[in-house]
């Protein structure tokens, strides 16, 4: 009997534990419900705020004269196409002229070699310009990240181009210096060669300054683009 | 000729969208107009590319609106980079209200003031946050924004949340 009584008392205490656990669960559930309510309230607030901003954003639309815009865009497009065509036609014309000289004019072997080298350069330059412009247009239809990466590469390439130009100019200047020294020593042509050296020194200096400036500005320019990514 | 008429119609339709994007990135009115024209030219060229080369034009993978917005955003970011290099870009430039429709009632005046506050606030955000928020305000989905910007959707969500927080703070700080 006492065993069964103690068992019953154990059951009772277990039931009481269960009850308190259930009440705790209820409390937790009620906390969760209030959290959900808070969240949905916050979401509603955020949605409301976004809707207000969307409406304000549409109200901020600057007035645009679409007819004038289309007319200006047409003109800009025409100028762009004309510029491209003129570049290509001029390049082609110079190349054809060089080719005509090569084929139909009596030339010395040095002249022949010179025009042989010159002939493809203008037309190649025209085609290269066309391809560069096509690439730039293509970039504008990429996603923003790819466009920014392209810009970064373009900046690096620009620096590389100026670096090569600088070393090229410096090499030419050194060659000119050697010629100048030779001519001054052999023929005493001091005035002519010092003027040549001076003019070319100015060009080398300008190219160096540009290269140096681009090199100094590059890290900041790249960081700024990185910040946009 | 038919293509030209179609592109003209398209530009008329999306001119307000491009104007809003331009205003989000540039406060100065004359530079804004220049930017809208650059955007229009880029959009025209991109649709030209559809007939000339499948490689560099509209390929029909996205909606026309998404494509126009992408090209316009690219142009806008390009413009910001150029202006930064020119050191003339003013982050807190004046919003030229004379070019929006003039307010005729006090309610409209309030709406315009809200619009001006919003644009001034938007222009103070970092570019990456500004882009996401501007595209959200245009009504694009997170997936569309992710495709336009070349980032994943979770990055868009993070940027959007941060952009909203920052813009709220900016708007609250206003007198």
Image: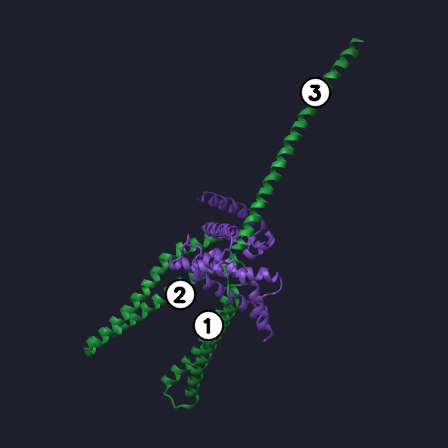
Q: SS class of the residue under badge 2?
A: helix
Q: Earlier in the sequence, mark 1 or mark 2?
A: 1
> Residue A129: which numbered mark, if any?
1
Residue pointed to by mark 2: A161
In front: label 3 or label 2: 3
Q: Chain of mark 2?
A: A
Residue A18 or residue A169, whichever sits in front: A18
Position of residue A224 measured from the top left corner of the image (x, y, whole percent) = 43, 54
Q: Chain of mark 3?
A: A
Question: Along the horizontal axis of the image, is A149 left or right of A115?
Answer: right
Q: Earlier in the sequence, mark 3 or mark 1?
A: 3
Position of residue A45 measured from the top left corner of the image (x, y, whole percent) = 58, 42
Q: Residue at 39% across / 91% down in the picture? A: A106
Position of residue B136 measured from the top left corner of the image (x, y, whole percent) = 56, 52
Rendered shade, chain A = green
Q: Residue at 23% across / 75% down in the picture? A: A193
Question: Along the horizontal axis of the image, is A31 left or right of B113?
Answer: right
């Amino acid at each position: 009997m006492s065993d069964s009584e103690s068992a019953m008392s154990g059951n009772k205490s277990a039931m009481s534990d269960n009850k308190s656990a259930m009440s705790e669960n209820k409390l937790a559930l009620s906390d969760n419900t209030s959290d959900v309510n808070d969240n949905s309230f916050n979401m509603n607030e955020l949605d409301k705020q976004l809707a207000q901003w969307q409406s304000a954003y549409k109200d901020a639309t600057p007035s645009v004269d679409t007819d004038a815009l289309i007319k200006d865009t047409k003109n800009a497009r025409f100028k762009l196409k004309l510029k491209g065509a003129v570049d290509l036609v001029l390049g082609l014309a110079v190349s054809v002229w060089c080719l005509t000289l090569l084929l139909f004019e009596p030339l010395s072997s040095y002249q022949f070699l010179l025009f042989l080298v010159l002939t493809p350069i203008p037309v190649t330059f025209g085609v290269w310009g066309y391809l560069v412009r096509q690439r730039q247009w293509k970039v504008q239809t990429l996603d923003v990240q790819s466009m920014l990466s392209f810009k970064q590469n373009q900046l690096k390439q620009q620096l590389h181009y100026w670096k090569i130009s600088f070393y090229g100019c410096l090499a030419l200047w050194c060659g000119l210096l050697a010629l100048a020294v030779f001519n001054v020593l052999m023929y005493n042509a001091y005035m002519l060669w010092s003027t040549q050296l001076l003019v070319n020194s100015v060009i080398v200096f300008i190219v160096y300054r540009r290269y140096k400036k681009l090199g100094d500005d590059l890290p900041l320019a790249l960081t700024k683009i990185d910040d946009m990514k | 000729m038919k293509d030209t008429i179609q592109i003209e119609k398209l530009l008329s339709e999306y001119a307000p969208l491009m104007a809003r994007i331009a205003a989000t990135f540039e406060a100065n009115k004359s530079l804004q107009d220049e930017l809208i024209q650059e955007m229009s030219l880029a959009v025209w060229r991109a649709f030209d590319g559809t007939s000339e080369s499948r490689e560099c034009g509209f390929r029909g993978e996205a909606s026309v609106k998404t494509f126009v917005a992408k090209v316009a955003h690219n142009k806008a970011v390009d413009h910001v980079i150029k202006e930064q290099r020119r050191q003339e870009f003013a982050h807190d430039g004046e919003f030229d209200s004379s070019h929006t429709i003039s307010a005729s009632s006090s309610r409209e005046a309030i709406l315009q003031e809200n619009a001006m506050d919003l644009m001034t606030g938007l222009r103070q955000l970092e570019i990456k946050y500004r882009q996401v928020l501007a595209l959200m305000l245009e009504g694009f989905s997170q997936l569309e924004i992710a495709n336009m910007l070349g980032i994943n959707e979770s990055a868009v969500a993070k940027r959007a949340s941060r952009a909203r927080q920052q813009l709220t703070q900016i708007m609250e700080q206003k007198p």
